Image (cartoon, coloured by chain):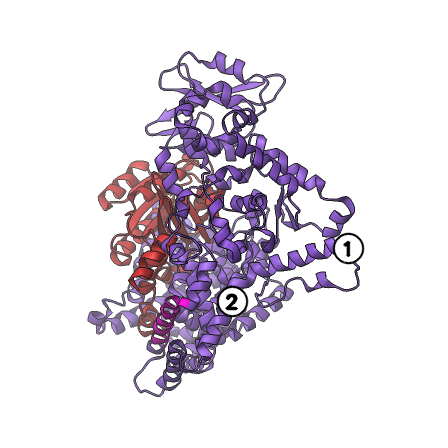
Chain colours: A red, B purple
């Protein structure tokens, strides 16, 4: 049993450390969540990409010193009516990007609500980044940089203004998140998955049935 | 530096060592191909010559070199560097691209892509042009620098860097290199794989009979002495080794692996794999592989680092050796199923290319041999899973065997467990799941199984787990799944979910995609696609293996994406904002009750590892969409329940509309817009709270019903509001529509910029 343990670990021992993270995207509809991720993914080495069937789920690895950080990126539907489904997506996520549109103040308010919700009920150590997207539309700006920056500082978030259109700060945002991620123990994907697998099997489906399932 | 590079490739695990065919320490000597990054690091002086060199020198040196040749020299400022690239343009043969250092990152002035160091920057530009007119060109000897005596490496200068690589090889890598050069001439190919247009194709051997295969072997012999140039991908330099496939070739050579390992280590026999050019690679049948050293050498070359993700058949673009892992059946694909892999319904059981053996053709012996080699090769590709499944099946049927006993115990226990009172279906399924995991562990420790898994080579553990899991489903889940379904269905019927699904489905089913807030440009499946989807749902329902079910689900999702894109503007990319409504739309036209039970089955029984990736994502989406339907508050019922509230709400709404009408651009509107979504969010945050906080829920049990009824009330109001809004919209003028939009919490405006 014990020999198997080591055997398995070594069997897939990579030259670099591999950390695999689930990253969830939250934010109002049409703030550019998927565009942001697509821009990030397109800007990377092809061979670190895994082909996926659609853009709602994307997987992308980035190299960071001696570590390969693999993001499994879960997009969520931003419509208010689907809001109550979000916990199913962000459970177990180690990172989140909450996106708003700098030209739409209501999306910033919504983003704040997301942050609050995540801080209250997502994984305790989740790394949250706030992205003020569509920064290329500066002439239509209705959310001031300072306002969001102050909010992010007060709340302990990473914050960047991004533009999926011009790629401004897109890679930077993901790299900043990658740097902030704890680089431990996910080296063996099997292992990591097993750990998280337990979380995923939390009977949250049950609780949803019992408390909201009417 | 040299030491480090060695370590990076000695990844053979204990499992190899455990098998007697590969003695300890062999792996120490095996591959010696450097990654491009390592190579670049080793010979920095060659491509980034120090100070007497300036841009003029670089221009002179690059003049007339093949396009893509480059040097990095000092720029005008001390901290800046200049990338000089030969672009093969007659007007301006050498172009300069300043490299800017900002903080800790480097980038080309005209590009947004930043890199932590120069090596990675150059590495990237050998793969992708980005802002450059051509990809950078690197001499192939970079990959073999570690074979050069240490004292020679620092002597490499720009002249060597820019000189045709054959010179260096001829000078410093003597006899072995010549072996390599000879090797391809003697290859008798059996399968031709070409990637000329990015697609994988097998060349008809009849063509070869007609035209010979000289053209093939010829083209594959030349590249070794050519600088390496790849436009799209560079598999060798892939830094992520996590899915190490380097030793997959063991499969090919497993019968003779003891004779095969003494040649490991002789990297020199192994040409730099990625240099195989012209889109053609050769592959031989496994039984020919160990007969002579030259052929062995080609096996060695399979060992060169390959792209690691086993999911993409598109690697063939890399012109690499076709490898057994590439054609694994989709059931082995784990967290991320590739588009290409689920397009094909490759079943391991299907016999390889029976049509090839058609007796109608009278084939020359040579061709027959080739064809049977094709068959064998293809057979070899799918065999590990088949062999595992077969062995597991045998073991499960073996009288008195420990595994057989364990399986029988599991089946009996599961079939009777339903009778125990007070056991919920979820608990039951969780027990099944842990039993499956335990059985899998048991298998893994079994010498019989290990002998098979060892032969598969350096397969990542999670892949082996998936193979075992699949084999296990057949012996353990197949006998019990009908029973489990009965319980799941009963449980869902008892808690009212199935009924709610049916009721709400009939309420919602006529809603268009727009009413579900789908994207404007996204299409929905047409009737023929819906038929296809229904067939897939049926297949999903009938499968007993949760992994196979999830694979089918992914196919459905792919169909949905296909329909979404059918009439969309080219280049439109649909994320979850668009996908979830579309999936919901499809579910409203499917048998939601059966799907609910299927979903429960998958959610509980799928190998936890598979919950992580793409399969997990779409399973979550399926679950979420079903939840949305089953928890939807039918507006009609609400109206009947609270006609009073409805009336007052519409009065209120009308009042606000009229009021707002007069001051459309006033602060009022802004206030409403600012507060609306926030309120909505806090409401739904509660929702999420009770959804997700299973751990804390025990302390909340008393509160939950209260919250719940509150939520119901709020959601009811919301639906009312929505109903009113929709009614109003019918008769309202344009101004009013804009106002209702600002009030409508459930449909925030949708912008079109990014």
Q: Are marks 1 and 2 on the same chain?
A: yes
Q: Which mark is residue A206?
A: none
Task: Quickly name the residue at label 2.
Answer: B387
Q: Is residue B446 magenta?
A: yes
* Prevailing secondary structure class for the magenta stretch in the rendered image: helix
Residue B717 image position (x, y, % from top left): 36, 67
Above or below for B624 versus B432: above
Q: Chain of mark 2?
A: B
Q: Horizontally, is B191 left or right of B55 in the view? A: right
Residue B619 image position (x, y, % from top left): 44, 64
Q: Is residue A54 visible?
A: no
Q: Are marks 1 and 2 in contact (CB under 8 Å)?
A: no
Q: Secondary structure at mark 1?
A: loop
Q: Horizontally, is B156 left or right of A6 in the view? A: right
Q: Is residue A212 magenta?
A: no
Task: Quickly name the residue at label 1.
Answer: B364
Tell me the crowding category of disc 1: few under 14, some 14 to 19, or many 20 or more residues within 10 angstroms, Cα based: few
Residue A81 image position (x, y, % from top left): 41, 61
Question: Which tag is nearer the camera, tag 1 or tag 2?
Answer: 1
Residue stretch in magenta: B429-447
Q: How many marks?
A: 2
């Amino acid at each position: 049993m014990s020999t198997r343990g080591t055997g398995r670990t070594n069997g897939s021992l990579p030259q670099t450390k591999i950390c695999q993270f689930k990253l969830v995207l939250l934010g109002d509809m049409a703030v550019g969540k998927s565009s942001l991720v697509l821009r990030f993914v397109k800007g990377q080495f092809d061979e670190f990409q895994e082909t996926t069937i659609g853009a709602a789920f994307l997987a992308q690895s980035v190299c960071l010193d001696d570590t390969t950080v693999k993001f499994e990126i879960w997009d969520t539907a931003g419509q208010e009516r689907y809001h109550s489904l979000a916990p199913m997506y962000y459970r177990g996520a180690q990172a989140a990007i909450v996106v708003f549109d700098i030209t739409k103040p209501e999306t910033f308010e919504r983003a704040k609500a997301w942050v609050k919700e995540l801080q209250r009920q997502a994984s305790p150590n989740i790394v949250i980044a706030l992205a003020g997207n569509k920064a290329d539309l500066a002439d239509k700006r209705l959310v001031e940089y300072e306002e969001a920056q102050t909010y992010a500082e007060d709340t302990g978030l990473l914050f960047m203004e991004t533009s999926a259109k011009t790629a401004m700060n897109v890679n930077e945002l993901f790299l900043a998140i990658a740097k902030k991620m704890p680089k431990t123990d996910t080296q063996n994907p099997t292992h990591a998955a097993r750990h998280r697998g337990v979380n995923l099997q939390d009977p949250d489906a049950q609780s949803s049935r019992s408390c909201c399932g009417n | 530096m040299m030491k480090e590079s060695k370590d990076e490739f000695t990844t053979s695990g204990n499992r190899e060592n455990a098998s007697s065919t590969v003695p300890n320490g062999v792996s120490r000597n095996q591959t010696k191909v450097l990654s491009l990054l390592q190579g670049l690091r080793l010979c920095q002086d060659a491509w980034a010559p120090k100070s007497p060199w300036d841009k003029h020198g670089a221009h002179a040196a690059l003049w007339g070199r093949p396009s893509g040749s480059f040097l990095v020299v000092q720029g005008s400022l001390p901290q800046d560097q200049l990338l000089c690239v030969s672009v093969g343009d007659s007007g301006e043969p050498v172009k300069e691209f300043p490299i800017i250092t900002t903080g800790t990152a480097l980038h080309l002035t005209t590009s947004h892509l930043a890199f932590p160091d120069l090596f990675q920057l150059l590495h990237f530009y050998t793969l992708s042009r980005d802002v450059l007119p051509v990809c950078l060109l690197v001499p192939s000897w970079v990959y073999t620098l570690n074979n050069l005596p240490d004292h020679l490496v620092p002597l490499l200068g720009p002249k060597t860097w820019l000189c045709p690589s054959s010179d260096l090889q001829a000078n410093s890598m003597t006899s072995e290199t010549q072996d390599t050069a000879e090797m391809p001439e003697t290859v008798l190919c059996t399968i031709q794989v070409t990637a000329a247009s990015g697609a994988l194709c097998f060349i008809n051997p009849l063509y070869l009979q007609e035209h010979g295969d000289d053209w093939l072997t010829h083209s594959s012999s030349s590249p070794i002495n050519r600088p390496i140039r790849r436009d799209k991908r560079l598999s060798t330099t892939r830094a992520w080794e996590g899915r190490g496939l380097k030793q997959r070739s063991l499969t090919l050579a497993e019968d003779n692996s003891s004779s095969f390992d003494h040649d490991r280590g002789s990297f020199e026999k192994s040409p730099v794999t990625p240099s195989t050019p012209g889109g053609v690679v050769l592959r031989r049948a496994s039984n020919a592989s160990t007969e002579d050293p030259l052929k062995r050498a080609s096996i060695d070359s399979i060992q060169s680092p390959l792209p690691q993700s086993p999911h993409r058949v598109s690697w063939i673009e890399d012109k690499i050796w076709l490898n057994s892992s590439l054609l694994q059946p989709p059931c082995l694909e784990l967290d991320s199923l590739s588009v290409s892999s689920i397009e094909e319904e490759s079943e391991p059981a299907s016999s390889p290319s029976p049509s090839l053996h058609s007796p109608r053709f009278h084939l020359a012996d040579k061709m027959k041999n080739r064809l049977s080699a094709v068959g064998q090769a293809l057979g070899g590709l799918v065999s590990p899973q088949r062999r595992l499944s077969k062995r597991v099946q045998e073991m499960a049927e073996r009288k008195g065997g420990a595994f057989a006993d364990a399986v029988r115990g599991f089946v009996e226990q599961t079939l009777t467990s339903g009778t125990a009172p007070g056991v919920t279906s979820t608990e039951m399924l969780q027990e099944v799941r842990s039993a499956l995991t335990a059985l899998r562990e048991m298998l893994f420790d079994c010498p019989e199984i290990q002998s098979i898994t060892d032969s598969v080579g350096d397969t990542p553990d999670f892949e082996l787990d998936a193979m075992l899991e699949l084999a296990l489903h057949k012996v353990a889940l197949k006998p019990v799944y009908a029973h489990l379904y009965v319980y799941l269905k009963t449980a869902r019927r008892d808690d009212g979910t199935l009924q709610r699904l049916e009721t709400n489905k009939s309420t919602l089913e006529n809603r268009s995609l727009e009413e579900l807030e789908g994207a404007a440009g996204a299409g929905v499946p047409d009737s023929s696609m819906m038929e296809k989807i229904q067939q897939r749902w049926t297949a999903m329902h009938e499968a007993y293996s949760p992994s196979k079910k999830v694979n089918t689900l992914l196919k459905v999702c792919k169909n949905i994406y296909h329909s979404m894109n059918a009439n969309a503007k080219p280049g439109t990319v649909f994320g979850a904002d668009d996908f979830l409504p579309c999936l919901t739309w499809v579910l409203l036209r499917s048998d939601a009750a059966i799907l609910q039970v299927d979903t429960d089955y998958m959610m509980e029984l799928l190998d936890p590892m598979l919950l992580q990736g793409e399969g997990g994502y779409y399973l979550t989406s399926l679950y979420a969409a079903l939840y949305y339907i089953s928890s939807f508050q039918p507006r009609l019922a609400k109206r009947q329940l609270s006609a009073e509230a409805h009336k007052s709400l519409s009065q209120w709404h009308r009042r606000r509309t009229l009021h707002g009408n007069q001051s459309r651009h006033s602060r009022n509107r802004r206030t409403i817009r600012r507060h609306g979504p926030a309120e909505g969010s806090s409401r739904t945050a509660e929702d999420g709270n009770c959804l997700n906080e299973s751990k804390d829920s025990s302390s909340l049990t008393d509160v939950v019903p209260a919250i719940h009824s509150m939520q119901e009330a709020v959601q009811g109001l919301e639906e009312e509001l929505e109903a009113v809004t929709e009614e109003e919209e019918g008769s309202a003028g344009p101004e009013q529509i804009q106002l209702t939009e600002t009030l409508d919490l459930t449909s925030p405006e949708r912008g079109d910029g990014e």
